[in-house]
Image: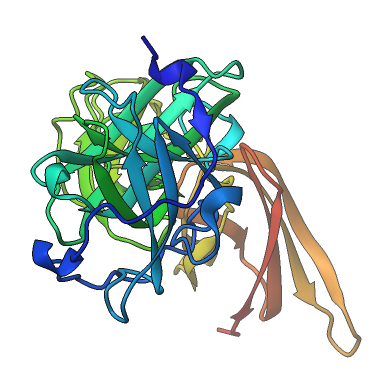
Amino acid sequence: MTTPSSRTRTRARRVATPLAGLLALGAATALAEPPPAGNLVANPSFERDPSADWSGFRSTFSQLPLAPGEAPDGSSAVQVVAGPTADGLEGYSIDDAVSSGGTSVPAGTQFVASAWIRAQSAQSIGKLGKVWVRERNADGDLIARLEGEVVLTGAFQQVTTPVFTSQRAGSQVDVYVSQIPALPGDAFAADLVTLSRNAPPAGVISASDTSPKVGATVTFGSAQVTDPEGGAVASRAWDTAGTGAFADGTGPSVTRRFDRVGTYVIRLRSSDAAGATSVLSRTIIVSTDGLTESPPPSGGPAVRPSLARWKVGTSRARVTTARFRLNTAVRLSTVLERKRVGRAGYQRVRATKITRVAAGNRRLTLGRKLTAGRYRVRLVLRPASGTPRTVVKGFVIRAR
């Protein structure tokens, strides 16, 4: 018996239409949307001779010119006629002659296939028309396959597979359209066959605090997680407890309070409308003092340190301090300079050694009993990973 992995393909040859009077089948056609930009199939609408791009399994096939508006796409379809070995197990089909999905596909690559199909003989009505995504090894042996199906009528209907995920690295992935079960003389017509890679949502999980201390509550968000094809993220599920159950929330963001020192992994499972699914993660390190910076999120860049809400004030005791908000834990050093009077440039007043500073609202002593004048402070911010950043802030001390 012939198996799907050893199916013998035959090239196209001209055949007569087995059904005279196609309109007797009620072949009203719903026009298709334009084929997807990422369609990997060559000659998907059979607008040219299909023999160069397609092959048959237990079948013969030919280009089928159609009346204006009858074809889902273009002006032609393909007519596929069951040969004498067509049976109830594998039926008969038309296959892409070259593996449209690629001949060395990475494991985990996701695909979706679709086709428009109708019965082309009276005895095919009521049988199943199918479109398949198939994965095979380099020798052509079947690894896995997945189909979408529809009951054939005299009208074109679109059929789409669920998301198929390749299982082995280096495999080949192709698409084919079939009728099952089948008898010799059965026939179907197909048009606009597509095979597209369906990338799952991608991006990074954001965190409101990347160096939390014990007792802190952190908000994790998915605003930077999007569908690469431009669609919507259809569903989300969070695992903040580390159980793998993804039962800690389904919204765009979640919060978690950390009551113990340790390293925690936050996970987000998200899917697009077609079902392509990804799991993103982010590691958070919780310390007693909030001085330990967590690593950057999976798939994201290192956090670039920055200051916000910068304010300088002098107390009655003439202690000058700066208040600011730091977005990430850093090692911080400063140089305080005063503008020269009557000359260009600045003169160094004092410098501080490198010290670790946690993210959040911070206060920094700039000096005591500073004389009136214009000052600037140069802050060097060194994150746990990434490039150091120098920030210069100016302020004025007025005479009392």
The residue lying at 51 percent from left, 45 percent from top is 12
Q: Nearer the viewer, residue 216 or 283?
A: 283
Res 171 quadrant in image = top right
**Farthest residue, direction top:** 1
Q: Nearer the viewer, residue 300 or 157?
A: 157
Res 279 quadrant in image = top left
Quarter of the image that includes the N terminus: top left
Q: Position of residue 64 (x, y in %)?
A: 39, 62
**Farthest residue, direction bottom:** 342
Q: Reply above or below: 73 against 341.
A: above
Q: Nearer the viewer, residue 331 or 173?
A: 173
The residue lying at 33 percent from left, 43 percent from top is 81
Q: Residue 362, can we see it?
A: yes
22 horizontally vs 203: left or right: left
45 horizontally vs 301: left or right: left
338 horizontally vs 11: left or right: right
Q: Residue 292, can we see it?
A: no
Quarter of the image that includes the C terminus: bottom right
Count of numbered circles on the image: 0
Q: Position of residue 130 (x, y in %)?
A: 25, 40
The residue lying at 24 percent from left, 40 percent from top is 186
Res 349 quadrant in image = bottom right
Q: Position of residue 54 (x, y in %)?
A: 52, 45
Q: Nearer the viewer, residue 221 or 155?
A: 155
Q: Position of residue 35 (x, y in %)?
A: 41, 65
* Image color mode: rainbow
